[in-house]
Image (cartoon, rainbow, N blue to C red):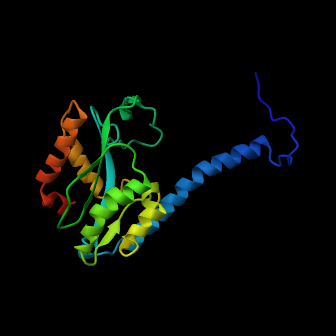
Amino acid sequence: MSITCRPGSGRPQQTSRVDNRHIVRNARIQPTASSATIQAQWCRTRGNWTAAEWNQIVFSDESRFNLGSDDNRVRVWRPRGERLNPAFSLQRHIAPTAAVMAWDVIAYNTRPPLVLIRGTMTAQRYAHDILQPHVLPLMQRLPGAIFQQDNARPHMARVSQDCLRIFTTLPCPARSSDWSPIEHIYDHLGRRTGHPTSLNELEAKLPQIWNEMSQDIIQNL
């Protein structure tokens, strides 16, 4: 059975199938190239920052911790053209697994308690459960601090931006969720949780590991 476009009452199509394929191909390529350019410019702009300037940044992010093997924390560096090579692939379970979301911030000299979240992070929840009780008091205690968050939808929503309007924020380029040093801290947590058998056990272990972690680990990132 074949599917074709039948003539309708609307404006006739002005592009051929070849044109359509070319448009789709460019649409897939260009956003990546554009994002890479923006990321490179972001790095060049801040490449000469001193250690003291970087120490003013308060880095924030969420991370998902699954029961069993963690499929969100494995990254593979592979040669070009080797995507399908079994040596550079990892079997992944696609069925939904029980998990807990952790959120926190790290600064050079301090970090607040780990915040655990079940369910979906919405803009309202981010503003009311994260920014207002945790971020705003911390930023008020750190004169001159600059708050960093990625461009996730809950972070960029108006209700979230309104909470942060009196503070300086660090713009984050798109598609750069893995550049923040807090990712290394979450990796540290994930490697030390062991193999909990329930969400309650996982939720008990994560704050314990977080609290026992030396601040030197953050300062040496």
Q: Where, quadrant-wise, is the C terminus in this rendering?
A: bottom left
Give the residue at x 14% y 53%: 211
Give the residue at x 11% y 51%: 212
Give the residue at x 17% y 51%: 210
**63 displayed left or right of 211:** right
Give the residue at x 64% y 51%: 26
One can see residue 176 in this view: no
Between 7 and 14, the residue placed more toward the observer is: 7
Q: Is residue 12 above or below residue 57?
A: above
Between 105 and 92, the residue placed more toward the observer is: 105
Q: Position of residue 51 (x, y in %)?
A: 24, 73
Q: Position of residue 121 (x, y in %)?
A: 39, 49
Between 217 and 96, the residue placed more toward the observer is: 96
**68 displayed left or right of 78:** left
Q: Position of residue 220 (x, y in %)?
A: 18, 61
One can see residue 115 in this view: yes
Give the residue at the far top of this rendering.
1
Q: Is residue 156 above or below residue 68?
A: below
**199 displayed left or right of 162:** left
Q: Position of residue 186 (x, y in %)?
A: 26, 49
Q: Where, quadrant-wise, is the N terminus in this rendering?
A: top right
| Figure quadrant of residue 77 | top left
| Numbered-mark total | 0
Between 31 and 151, the residue placed more toward the observer is: 151
